Image: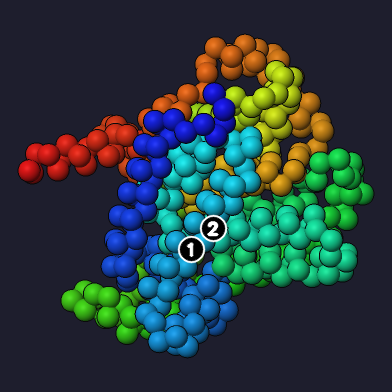
Amino acid sequence: MSPNKISPALILMACFLFWQIIEQFLSALTWGHDSFQMTECLINYSGGFVRRGLAGSVAMMVSNWLGMQANQLVVLSGFFFYFLLLGWLLIKATRVFPAVLILSCVIMGFPAYQDCIVRKDCLGLLLFLACLKVEAGHLPRVGAFLVINLLAAAAILVHEAFAFYALPALVICGARDCESFSPRVLIRRTLVLLPSIGCFLTTTYFHGTPQIADEVNKSWLPLWKMIDPAKAGLEHPSGAIQALGWTSQEGIGPGMNLLTSGFYQPTVWILLFALSFTIIVLFTNRGANHDAFHTMKEKIRIAALLIMQFIFISPLFVLGHDYGRWLFFWAASALILHTTQRQTPRCVELFVAQGFGNVKASHYIQKIRARDWYLLFFGIPVCWNIPSFLIASPLARHSQFLWSWLRLH
């Protein structure tokens, strides 16, 4: 099958995704004081410098300038960034990665099915892509240095997770057929990013206080009353704004609780990441007009990038418990790196190639063909009970909705 052939499963996937996007858009217009999505986007510098404050400060300034509600501005911006990233992947990445994979819950389906489009994840990934483009462009070295650090610093001030999935990749994953990996190259590329690293350390130190959280919440009190006038307790911070006042222990606590909650939840997440890894490798270069050697080479390259990106984001599993979002950062950033012709050090690819050979990966890949309809059954559950697993996939979720509608009518 051609990687871009339009199959019934691809049409279904696109229809399901579009349906989910429309549903989330209409819902997002009502999000306010208690919504983690909305409050994360509206953190600002009203109480002083604090992590994640850039986007909210810009939203407040533009909202006052245009006379537009800040929540509506944030929703429109979130969906714009989502469609921009989705469009770029569909135009540029489908040479290697089928459209059905990009639309699935493994990649761009995740923000739609998990109500994450309004968060700043797609903006961070787009800024990462911009850094890669500037690095590979024709700007003078000093100009590229300034622009890359400006973009990276802006991304870190929007959300510090950028420092995990982007900064190490900018240091270690070089352009294809470009510089060889060596300690000297590693040191030079790290020195280039020192301003961005300094920005990340600053956001780590000024991570927030209860007083700052109160001031940020007060700055949006008129908006909260406009969105939901009957809501009680609007004068007290909630959602991501409240989290600014957490101690380090409170911030690390939810992630550590999940990791130490027993056998079940850590095992589920390990299996989900392993399954996502398998799906991405299986669908890579599917049906392309290349020989088996070239196809396996591409699979090894994306597998190496996925392994490296997983190592880079691994601290996030302790620092937070939004594991589904970490999976999205991991998978989407690896596809961006591959599409922009980046690769891991040669030793990592050789390690992956040896591992593939030991487990006879090529034999299993030939036996388990990458079929579009597989992805209709893959989803990431919101909760960890059996019903949540059963309705997590696009097909099951929309089948449940259709069944409920038929029963009512």
Quarter placement of the C terminus: top left
Quarter placement of the N terminus: top right
In the rendered structure, which amino acid carries the disc numbered 2? Answer: Leu
Q: Is residue 43 above or below residue 13?
A: below
> Which residue position is annotated with label 1?
80
User: What colouring does the structure picture have?
Assistant: rainbow
Residue located 36% across and 36% down the image: 12
Whether pointer 1 and pointer 2 mark residues with C-beta atoms closer than 8 Å, the reply is yes
Q: Is residue 116 above or below residue 69?
A: above
Front residue of 52/341: it is 341
Residue 63, quarter of the rendered image: bottom left
In this rendering, position of residue 200 left or right of residue 255: right
Mark 1: secondary structure:
helix
Mark 2: secondary structure:
helix
Front residue of 211/155: it is 155
As measured in the structure, the alpha-carbon distance from the residue carrying label 1 to the one carrying label 2 is 6 Å
Q: Is residue 162 above or below residue 19?
A: below
User: Could you tell me if residue 269 is visible in this image?
Assistant: no
Res 84 label: 2
User: Could you tell me if residue 39 is visible in this image?
Assistant: yes
Where is residue 185 drawn, in percent x and y?
A: 89, 49
The 10 Å Cα crowd at callout 2, few under 14, some 14 to 19, many 20 or more, is some
In the rendered structure, which amino acid carries the disc numbered 1? Answer: Phe
Residue located 30% across and 55% down the image: 23
